[in-house]
Image: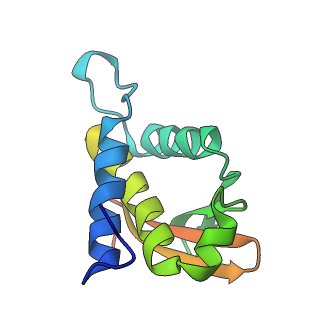
Amino acid sequence: MSLPGSRDPRAKALTAGRAWGRRLESPAPHGKALGAKESIDQLVGVLDEFGFAPERRKSGGAQQIGLRHCPFLELAETRTNVVCPIHLGLMQGVLESAAAPVTVDRLEAFVEPDLCLAHLTVEGTAR
């Protein structure tokens, strides 16, 4: 699949990232759904395994995950429209596969030279 040359590379990249995230094994024991904290912990663990150097954050009561290292930094600097949606989709797919009560609404790229922010919403909290 050629993402950069397609009509909507962002949408295709997001779809590919979600599929990738859904294929990762969910640690939920015997079909038991994880709570919000455990779901975020799981996501942080997956991101850590991939080398993103994630850190849990809160801003004005909102949950975030800071990503301090991008394993594809050189490519992300020139192909943000492809690399960042793949990473957003990966996070969404991980949470979807665990039937988590948490979603990743958006990924804010390069809020600092070495920081991207994933914005989370926990079910039952105001957006």
**Lateral position of residue 27 relative to residue 67, left or right:** left
Please name the residue shown 45% across and 80% down the image: 81
Please name the residue shown 37% across and 28% down the image: 25
On screen, residue 72 above or below 74:
above
Furthest residue to the top?
A: 30
Instruction: Say which of 75 and 25 sits in front.
Output: 75
Quadrant, the C terminus: bottom left
**Lateral position of residue 100 relative to residue 77, left or right:** left
Looking at the picture, how far across and down is residue 10, in whole percent?
Answer: 34, 76
Please name the residue shown 72% across and 62% down the image: 68
* Figure coloring: rainbow
The answer to whether one can see residue 70 in this image is yes
Looking at the picture, how far across and down is residue 38, in whole percent?
Answer: 46, 37
On screen, residue 5 above or below 72:
below
**Quarter where residue 11 is shown:** bottom left
The answer to whether one can see residue 127 in this image is no
**Lateral position of residue 76 relative to residue 5, left or right:** right
Instruction: Say which of 14 and 111 sits in front.
Output: 14
Q: How many marks?
A: 0
On screen, residue 124 above or below 5:
above
**Lateral position of residue 82 relative to residue 15, left or right:** right
Looking at the picture, how far across and down is residue 98, in whole percent?
Answer: 31, 37
Please name the residue shown 35% across and 46% down the image: 20
Instruction: Say which of 30 and 4 sits in front.
Output: 4
Quadrant, the N terminus: bottom left
**Quarter where residue 17 is shown:** bottom left
